[in-house]
Image: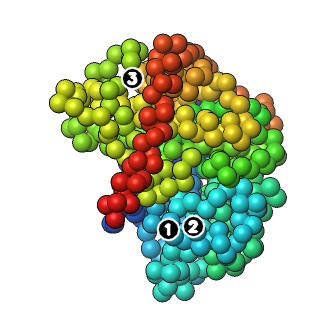
Amino acid sequence: MYLGIDLGTSGIKVVLVDETETVRASHTEQLDVSRPHPGWSEQNPEDWWQATLRALDVLARSHAADMAAVRGIGLSGQMHGAVLLDAAGEPLRPAILWNDTRCEAECAELEQSFPALRQVTGNPAMPGFTAPKLLWVRKHEPAIFARLHTVLLPKAYLRYRLTGEMIEEMSDAAGTLWLDTGARAWSEAALAATGLPLSAMPRLVEGSAPAGQLTEELRARWGMETAPVLAGGAGDNAAGAVGLGAIRPGSAFVSLGTSGVLWATTDRFRPNPEATVHAFCHALPGLWHQMGVTLSAAACLAWWSGVAGEKEAALLQALPETPTAPSDVTFLPYLSGERTPHNDGSIRGAFVGLSADTSRAALTQAVLEGVAFSFRDCLDALRAAGTVVTEADVIGGGSRSTTWIKILASVLGITLHRLADGEHGGAFGAARLGRLAATGEDPVGLCTPPRRLAAIMPDPALQAAYEARLPLYRALYPAIKQAQRAKL
């Protein structure tokens, strides 16, 4: 039996997976995000830990025999977050999350002070990444920076609480801007550019490698026969790729989670930071990936649900399964800034084209289409980086909506596949990594794709209509940017 723990932005999800790769049980504990200032996004690491304890306590009560047999544990989690610890291993402040945009100025400073940044890390400096966050802390919270001993990413903090060891793996480390991504090792030059020594970083392992053992106290708490080994694990998207079997060059998927990702697996480090395409390590040795990212995907529907005062399911049910035409309203999904292709942490979203006749359904459809257009920006950025995507699997909470997938397929102009258990995502991939760490078996034999439920192809008429609408969507970004500058 194997356990996967996924630390998401909105919750902790745990899954129990047996030897046949059947999910025997799952449970989710919700998390809240603190936004003390515009553009800020923080969470208390202790909240992650308490939610993890509650989630595993639930499984220990409901599936005691399965929990007793757990041999390996894998971790996945939200990337880029900065957990700052003192010499005693205690957090110095709330964790600054991936969708926090406060450090835009520090990104420019980092690129200036370390001109080789893009060549070494494969990525431009962006507010979401970890390194600029530390520059912000050094500048604005010098007393905290002076006490800083170790920086961990979110899931590495959970590992620390589970095992007592500070260890990180390659896929998550690649999202810090401190990793020499091609060499799969910390870059002392990149660290020095943010005023940090190599000693501030945890030990590095591959995602499928053993990385600590559950403490005796926790083993006894959950009734496990032996203390399971923990795998290195993976950042959320790399864990999703492991769960999907996207471990061969050319494999691709779309993640419709809180944020949105268009992923393509590669057999070598292929950076193209000028196209704002991420180039990161995969969670398995000898593999890398390219990724286009939109900061708000399913988060946009969640936001609109709150504003409209209607549950997401009800909003989606008001739409036809296949729209006959684009909404009259255009939505820009920049609720927390945007990465691909704009690298703009300060841009904000908008509804454009409202009239007295605009209905709630039209606005809901516009939200789905705006996110789809953002994915189209990602697809075209990958194409500019030399990666051709002709089909992709779809995972994440948004994959439950057939309407959304049909819109997305027509906007992208590629075939999308709905999957069985597409929502287990990172937690299931983490469980696979836990198994690999415990057994040492061949990843190729284990990490097979899930069953595809349906292939959703672009609707020709709708694809043509969205292609005609795309120039308007893209023209709105500079217009909104100019309006923001005028407001300031």
Q: What is the secondary structure assignment of the residue under circle 1?
A: loop
Give the residue type at disc 3.
Pro
Q: With respect to residue 434, does 356 lie above or below?
A: above
Q: With respect to residue 463, does 131 lie above or below?
A: below
Between marks 2 and 3, how big is the CA–CA gap?
A: 37 Å
Between marks 1 and 3, how big is the CA–CA gap?
A: 36 Å
- The image quadrant that residue 211 belongs to is bottom right
Q: Position of residue 321 (x, y in %)?
A: 38, 16
Name the front one of labels 2 and 3.
3
Q: Is residue 359 left or right of residue 60?
A: left
Between marks 2 and 1, how big is the CA–CA gap?
A: 7 Å
Q: Position of residue 414 (x, y in %)?
A: 60, 22
Residue found at x 75% / y 73%: 188
Q: Position of residue 263 (x, y in %)?
A: 64, 38
Q: Locate the C terminus and report the quarter of the image it occupies.
A: bottom left
Q: Are marks 2 and 1 in contact (CB under 8 Å)?
A: yes
Name the front one of labels 1 and 3.
3
Residue found at x 59% / y 73%: 109
- The image quadrant that residue 159 belongs to is bottom right
Q: Which residue is mark 2?
A: 107
Q: With respect to residue 460, does 31 lie above or below?
A: below
- The image quadrant that residue 454 belongs to is top right
- Residue density around tag 2, few if under 14, some if 14–19, many if 20 or more, within 10 Å: many
Give the residue type at disc 1.
Cys
Give the residue type at disc 2.
Cys
- Residue density around tag 1, few if under 14, some if 14–19, many if 20 or more, within 10 Å: many
Residue found at x 51% / y 25%: 467
Q: Which residue is mark 3?
A: 326
Q: Which residue is mark 1?
A: 103
Q: Are marks 2 and 3 in contact (CB under 8 Å)?
A: no
- Residue density around tag 3, few if under 14, some if 14–19, many if 20 or more, within 10 Å: some
Q: What is the secondary structure assignment of the residue under circle 2?
A: helix
